[in-house]
Amino acid sequence: MSAITLSVNGTTHRLDVDPTTPLLYVLSEDLQLRGPKFGCGLSQCGACTAIVNGDAVRTCVTPVSRVNGATISTLDGLGTAENPHPIQKAFIDEQAAQCGFCLSGVILTAKAFLDKTPKPSDAQLHEAMSGVLCRCFTHQRMIRAIKRYAEKTV
Amino acid sequence: MKPLMTPDARLALAQAGFSRRRFLKGAGALIVAFRVGDAFELAESAFAQGFNGTGNPQLDAWLAVAADGWVTACTGKGELGTGLFTAQTQLVAEELSVPLARVRLVQCDTQLTPDQGTTSGQQSHPTNFRNANLAQACATAREALVALAAARLRVPLDRLTVKDGVVGAADDATQHVTYAELVGGKNFNLTISGTAKRKHPSQWTVLGSSVRRLDLPELVTGKAEFVHNVRVPGMLHGRVVRPPSPGATLTGVDDASVKGMPGIVKVVVKNDFVGVVAESSWQAIQAAQRLKVTWTTAPPLPDMKTFHDRMRTQAGSRDTLLVDSGDVEATLKSAPTVVKSTYVHPYQMHGSVGSSCAVADVKEGKATLWSPTQAVYPMKRTVAAILGLPAESVRVIYTRGSGCYGINGADTVTYDAALMSQAVGRPVRVQLSRRDEMAWENFGPPFVIDQRAGVDARGNIIAWDYEGWSAGMGGRPGYDTPGNVVTGLLVGFTPQVASPRSPAPAPTEPLNNSSNTAPSYIVGRAGGETHGAGTVKSERVLSHSLPSPFFTGPLRAPERFQNTFAHESFMDEIAAHVKADPVEYRLRHLSNKRLAEAVRRAASAAKWEPRPSPRAALTRTGVASGRGISCVVYEGDNGYVAAIAEVDVNQDTGTIHVKRIVIAQDCGPISNPDGIRNQIEGGALHAMSRALFEEVTWDNEKVTSVDWRTYRTFPVGFDIPSVEAVLINQPDEEATGAGETSITAVPAAIASAVFDATGARLRQMPFTPERVKAALALR
């Protein structure tokens, strides 16, 4: 076990955990966050995504020891149902979800990308989203929502 | 039984007004219940007694209008990601004329909601939006409330209108009374009325409009409770250890191999079931990896390369004739032209993005399950069988999971959690690994389909012969077959397989095209009745069901997907053979007006240019463009859809780029236009993924498509086609399903578009570049 400090959604947590534990389990079990989810455990789908020090990170394969001291945001921390973040609002406006399990991957990957590349070409946006799965295939609406956010907000 | 509840469950119930005490104390409510024959199922439901106020266990409640004007409705059809929660809430608000925000919908909880079997097969609209069940219960309540108002206001019924829960005289604004006032402190116990009149869709103000998904704000902000997020006090984490291959049985478990690992609570073994329970997920995962388990060597799996050919000759099939006019061979023999083809379909998987998860709390002879199952009531019975408990001691609470598209790992992981919780006497959460999800789920079954068509001198089809082979094992566990999923088998239950029967007996029942085994173009005469959608009178549909080495089960548009690919591609082949326009040729052979209209509407929206396929001036290299159409009456009467696909085919690489998909769909009166569009779009792209990429693979001992590198699909960033939906509203027809229609039609539209572009016919899914190149080489 080792002492780990994480700043998650604006709150600092000091935890005593097995340092090999993937960040996902710390977020979803120790901190009881609902946003990041276990999809594949192999960094192939994106469901576990959180933004770590500004980058979209696959928390299912990231040992917590590697992000000691990091600043982390999850889908839970971005906005609330009453006051969603503009990118979350864009997803509501476009009705861009079905089951919703993949949304951490879709929304946070897009957000981290747009934070760094505010005016992407279509090709850049598609490339950025090329590692994220939605098996309900809400792709058309999701891309529309991301573009709506990019055009209006970024 | 005092169940443990998550904070969310407690909150939902509190919000729902489901307090027995509150009703019994006389706050008052108008309750609509229905009589059921199965007292066993309901005897344990304290809430049912509270509802009807009489203590009669044979009554179960659909809805309650409380003294505060709130409506609480119960449904046995759950939200799987399709928008059904919102649509059902609209239904209740509409039929009762109350604001949407004053409706609380409680879904799929064996202690609270009616047994509506399984949420599947696009049956939720036919079940709850026609003149029965939830819709009819709402109409019953509304009629009763208006009658109470008529008596109270002394205004004739035909002069009363209802808006926002207020009944008023149409011609006198001073005469009105609220539902809350009508209910007052009294209890009204009604049974569902078969004659209560529902609103006609022309009167709708809430249903029929694109109400936004009520659950989306919580979903997009990560606040929604998935089963993966359920946390109950004292909860542990379990991990399963599956056999190395199908058929392998357990020979030994070395508990000492994980002794001393941190957090280990117990190694659970029951027959061939092995699991590890630990304090945390990560501890359970590590322990499951380290646990030394030995298994027998299973007999080798059948060779994948020759599997489809083998199905044809394999012994022990169960043969079924769906229709047989008796003259097919003779008609084919006399026909000037006979067209024939063989279509091949792989095993495909549900491939949910989230590995399946469930939470169980089994102790003191009682069990509470939080499960993403589509079938809470059946699950209650089979979990009871797995645990050796009476069914009345089991409660199953549906808790949303990752989109399932049929029977993914949801049911089996619920058994996993139940078994491990029983073994440790504490709540256990189990989430499958990606490999365990993908290697052991109930795959959509493989098919080989031979078809022959006789064509007369004018180019019309006069005979259609279908013969198909598929392989199956297990499926939904239903009420009594837990062995239909892997965990049930591992603990000693037997999966269902079709009992051999050959030759098939002659069909005596009317055509039931629920699996779309029959093509749309035959008259479908059987059992003295005609239930087909087409004109071809000489007809035979013969299918062979064989045992499968892998578990199979319903996957979005089960069997309809495979069969329709074969029918519609074959129809395109026949049209090409007689040099007819594929749209005109379909219309020529369709008798079903609603399907024909869907075809016309799709063609119109896509600006379809009438001409035969393939297009003129084909090239043999470079990129070629084409378009194709396909259509289907889903299940014979549950949705009418036509799809047109436009593609570019790179003839040098064999890659297909789908540029545009147009879907015209008739599903009766439309509950929520945007909700249907979302289903149509998702279904069309899901179809494209299955048509181009998805195939379960295996070697001689195990499934080898066990992650997203080995089981291919396409990501959100993929260059997708534009998907355009044409909605055909039918306010005077009955509601049909809409979740499995577009997916069914799209693959043949893509394959036919490839043919149109290149003259090469694709007869085996998925259409990989290798298969496309092989088809191109045959030109």
Image (cartoon, coloured by chain):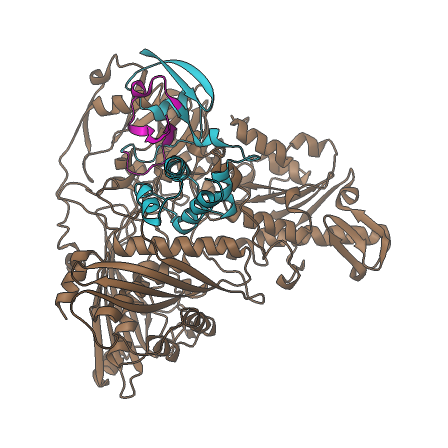
Residue at the far bottom: name it.
Answer: B457
Q: Is residue B223 above or below residue B640?
A: above
Q: In this view, does B706 lie above or below B727?
A: above
Q: Position of residue A48 (x, y in %)?
A: 36, 32
**A65 and B155: which one is in front?**
A65
Chain letter corresponding to the colour brown:
B
**B512 and A107: which one is in front?**
A107
Q: Is residue B252 above or below residue B764?
A: above
Q: In this view, does B620 lie above or below B49?
A: below
* Residue B314 visible in rendering: no
User: Is B734 in the magenta?
Assistant: no
Q: Where is residue B393 in the image (x, y as percent from the top left)?
A: 48, 31
The answer to whether B257 appears left or right of A1 in the picture is left
Chain letter corresponding to the colour cyan:
A
Which stretch did the figure color magenta?
Answer: A43-71
Residue at (79% x, 50% y) in the render:
B148
State the image quarter where residue B301 is shown.
top left
Q: Position of residue B539 (x, y in %)?
A: 31, 75
Q: Where is residue B304 in the image (x, y as percent from the top left)?
A: 15, 51
